[in-house]
Amino acid sequence: LLQKSATCDEVHYLGIGKRILQTKSFSIRGSHLHPPLFFYISSLPLYFIDIPEKIFNIKNPILRGQNIIFLLPDDLITILTRIPFLIAGVFLMLGIYIWGKKLFGNFPALLSLGLAALSPNITAHARLATPDILLSLSFFLSIFFLWKICCVKNNFYNYFLFMLFTSASILCKYTGIIIIPLILIIVFIHFKKHLVNIGSVSYTHLRAHETSLHLVCRL
């Protein structure tokens, strides 16, 4: 986090989220590269830093980002923009442990946590201000709350968080759209399983899962 200088992608993305909010427009160059949620989060530290208009008028996004970095000494802006993504990585690790413990117990959960923490992809992207770790976290939490709806408790709280993180997955990175067919497949398999065991399933329980499928399709 502290030793690695800004990557080309990080420099390219700097300030885009702040500019979109300022102008209510996606006209700034580079804003089409990802959905807006990522840009808003990557610009969190910049909301408290005055960026001159002449910097935003620079057409080249790399030069624009470099000029934003130079506003504070010692690569401080790069470090500040990375902090939200580092926190997202920590929450991802925590989520893996909690879900693993609920399903299999403490030791398998710790083993899963260790494998995830040592994954080169996660360790590389959790310290960079890029959308990958945000997509991983929101994707994970969406499937986690879908599991809670199907297997633990079917209530408004779980539905709300499921829809929230599903939307966040799509708004973090374009490839997050693959979560929609995945959710439909999971719900279909779960619903089909209960139809096979219809003799032991109450009518109320079936109606609850029909409601789940209806909400997911509407999403």
Image: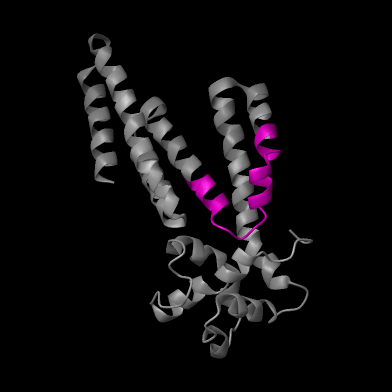
Q: Tell me: 38 left or right of 196.
A: right
Q: From the top left corner, tell me how far across and down residue 120 is, in percent.
A: 68, 43
What coloring was used for the rendering?
Answer: one colour
User: Can residue 199 be seen?
Assistant: yes
Number of labels in the image equals: 0
User: Residue extending furthest front?
Assistant: 60
Residue at horizontal 29%, vertical 40%? Answer: 216
Residue at horizontal 36%, vertical 30%? Answer: 186
Q: Tell me: 72 left or right of 201.
A: right
Classify 103 as above or below 170. Answer: above
Q: Tell me: 32 left or right of 190.
A: right
Question: Is residue 200 on the magenta stretch?
Answer: no
User: Residue extending furthest bottom?
Assistant: 54
Residue at horizontal 61%, vertical 40%? Answer: 94
Q: From the top left corner, tell me how far across and down residue 21 is, in percent.
A: 44, 75
User: Residue extending furthest top?
Assistant: 199
Classify 212 as above or below 20. Answer: above
Camera-nearest residue between 113 and 35 = 35
Q: Tell me: 33 left or right of 119.
A: left
Main SS, magenta region, reads helix
Q: Quadrant of the N terminus?
A: bottom right
Question: Is residue 131 on the magenta stretch?
Answer: yes
Q: From the top left corner, tell me how far across and down residue 210 is, in percent.
A: 23, 30
Residue at horizontal 67%, vertical 55%? Answer: 127
Classify 143 as above or below 33. Answer: above
The answer to which quarter of the image holds residue 58 is bottom right
Residue span colored magenta:
114-138
Q: From the top left corner, tell me how far across and down residue 163 is, in percent.
A: 36, 46
